[in-house]
Structures are given as C-alpha cells and as structure tokens.
Image (cartoon, helix red, strand yellow):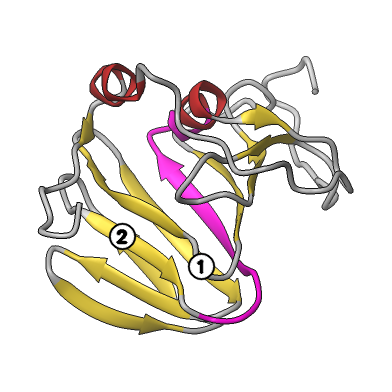
Amino acid sequence: MRKDPNAPWWAVIGPDEGQHRWQPLPSRGYVSLKLSPENMPYDGFSSGIQVLPAGCNVREHGHKQNHELIFVYEGTGTCEIEDEHFDIVPGCTILFGRYARHLVTNTGDCDMRFFWVFFPPGLENWFEAIGKVRQPGEEMPEAFDRPEDVEEVMEMMRFVPPRERPDD
C-alpha cells in the first residue's frame, strides 16, 4: 500500500488472492474477500465474491445499517426481497437497501457466482465469524452448521433476523 496519502492508489486482485472462507449451511460454497478497509485506504465499503453451490441459499436476512449490492455473473436462481420474487441470471444487479429482508437461492445445476459490495463495510466480519478458512483449490469440506452463537453475532452486526416461515 502506498504511504503517501496524496499519491494515486489502485489494486489489481487475482482470483486466488484475498481472504477465503468456507460457508456453513445453508449456503455452503465459499466467500472471497477482495477489498476492505484492512487492505485499502477507503473505509466506505468492502467487496468480494460468493460462490453458492446448486441447491444452496443465502438465508433470509436484512441489514439495519448497511446496503448490499450484488452482481450475478454465473449461474441462475431466485431472489426474494420482502415477499417479492425475482428470477436471477448472469448480468443481474440487485441492491438490498437497509432493512430489506432478502433471500438468494441457487436453483440451477451449477455454482452461482456473484460479486458483492457492502457499504459501509462489515460483511467481512460476518464471514469470518461463521466461516472456516479456505485455501484456493481446496476441496469443499463436509457440510457444517453455523456456530452456536450465530444469533448473538447477527445482533452484534445489526442484522435484521429472518422471519418465521411455515416450513422452518
């Protein structure tokens, strides 16, 4: 990183660079953190990619103090935002504003991949709290559950909890 705050700053981060975390059920797959205030001079956002295997989902949740933007570049699925349903395909951009509960499901037969931006930053702390360290190229581990204190972590990170659903 450049020490002169007035010098131009840039980053080029390769596919295997960054911090990588396996994700617990129901997401499985992994997240790769690419940019955060820890490795860049900007404190307004963090970003990375998420790989969501076929049949898996990002459980319903919302954010009390953050906005989340995703760009789907591989795979297909559905997105539910506050009871509205959308089909998602490569090229879809989705913005989840504060308090908007959302659920993303991979309904395809291959991995769904999306780039995410979280502002202000903080999603990287969630992935660290619930995930397990992943090395690029490593085989996906056996499915594992979220930590027992996940509700406390969600509250600390100011997540909006999922609604009760009849099939839960």
- Between the C-alphas of marks 1 and 2, the distance is 15 Å
Q: What residue sits 43% from the left and 43% below the top? A: 118
Q: 14 or 147: nearer the eye?
A: 147
Q: Amino acid at mark 2?
A: Leu
Q: Which residues are magenta?
A: 108-124
Q: Residue at x 37, y 50 (%)?
A: 68
**In the displayed structure image, the side of residue 34 where residue 83 appears, left or right:** left
In x, y percent, where is residue 120?
Answer: 38, 34
Q: Residue at x 43, y 72 (%)?
A: 93
Drawn side of residue 105 relative to residue 155, left or right:
right
x and y percent of residue 76 in the render?
Answer: 52, 81
Residue 90 in the figure: left or right of residue 30: left
Q: Position of residue 154 (x, y in %)?
A: 29, 26
Q: Is residue 121 magenta?
A: yes
Q: Nearer the viewer, residue 132 or 4?
A: 132
Circle on res. 71: 1
- Whether residue 33 is in magenta: the answer is no
Tell me, for residue 103, which label it has, or none: 2
Q: What is the secondary structure assignment of the residue under circle 1?
A: strand
Local secondary structure at mark 2: strand
Amino acid at dot 1: Phe
Which mark's residue is nearer the viewer, 1 or 2?
Answer: 2
Q: Quadrant of the N terminus?
A: top right
Q: Nearer the viewer, residue 158 or 76?
A: 76
